[in-house]
Image: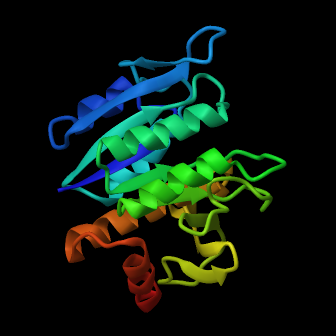
Amino acid sequence: MIKIGIIDSGINAEQLSLIRNISSIDGLYLKRLGDTDLIDRDSNFSDENGHGNECFRIISSIITNVNYYIVKIFGKQLETELDILVAAIETCITERVDIINISAGIRLDKTPEKLRNVCYKAYLNGIIILAAQHYQGKVSYPAQFPYVISVGTGDLSNGEYFRFFDMDEGPVFLTSAADLFPEDSDWSKSTSFSCAKMTGYIGNLFNERGKMNFEKLIGELITLN
């Protein structure tokens, strides 16, 4: 059974109670310990703003027979620090997940080498990372790295699940979560939820055809496009 790591704002108790009887779910909350440089590892990963719970709802509605590891890095606001995001990916590597969903990104003036290195470490361990593009198309990390699947949102033709673009910075996939929300919802055009939808799709592909490394997966997706 594959294992999906979701790095976000956690999931709520109601969603947990609905899923726990059919999937293995574990996780933690990574946060700064006071004014120190230390990162606290809290066992309570309940969602405080709804973003992570929505990502989990989308993924779990698409794929069954999967284990989850939830890493909460956001509290009431969708704000975190670079070191905490790096620690979250390290945690997912330690937990031996197969796919990491990061429906978020960090905007920085310089390429964050620590984040680049941990994403590359995940890649070497055969872990697929999907990260949402910035909603305005600006440079954000980790979606900008070549060994991360960058997911944006866009209009698709009937019967089209995604579009693939081979960009200099790496593979970019556009999909749409518009079918998952009311037409007047701002979330219908969110790259975050498009990313979650693509994660569910790839998880299903792993269940059907077996786990794949990054290059094999991209090749498989191109043939399905």
Q: List x then y, in percent, for residue 133.
A: 67, 59
Protein image colouring: rainbow
Question: How many labels, in total?
Answer: 0
114 lies above or below 80: below
Q: Which residue is painted at 35% across and 63% down in the image?
A: 126
Q: Which residue is painted at 55% across and 40% down in the image?
A: 86
Q: List x then y, in percent, for residue 40.
A: 48, 17
Quarter residue 128 falls in:
bottom left
Q: List x then y, in percent, for residue 21.
A: 15, 36
| Closer-to-camera residue (94/189) | 94
Quarter residue 114 falls in:
top right
Horizontal arrangement in the rendering, residue 122 relative to residue 2 (left or right): right
Q: Which residue is painted at 57% across and 32% down in the image?
A: 84
| Closer-to-camera residue (114/154) | 114
Quarter residue 20 falls in:
top left
Q: Quick one: which residue is furthest to the right in this view?
A: 109
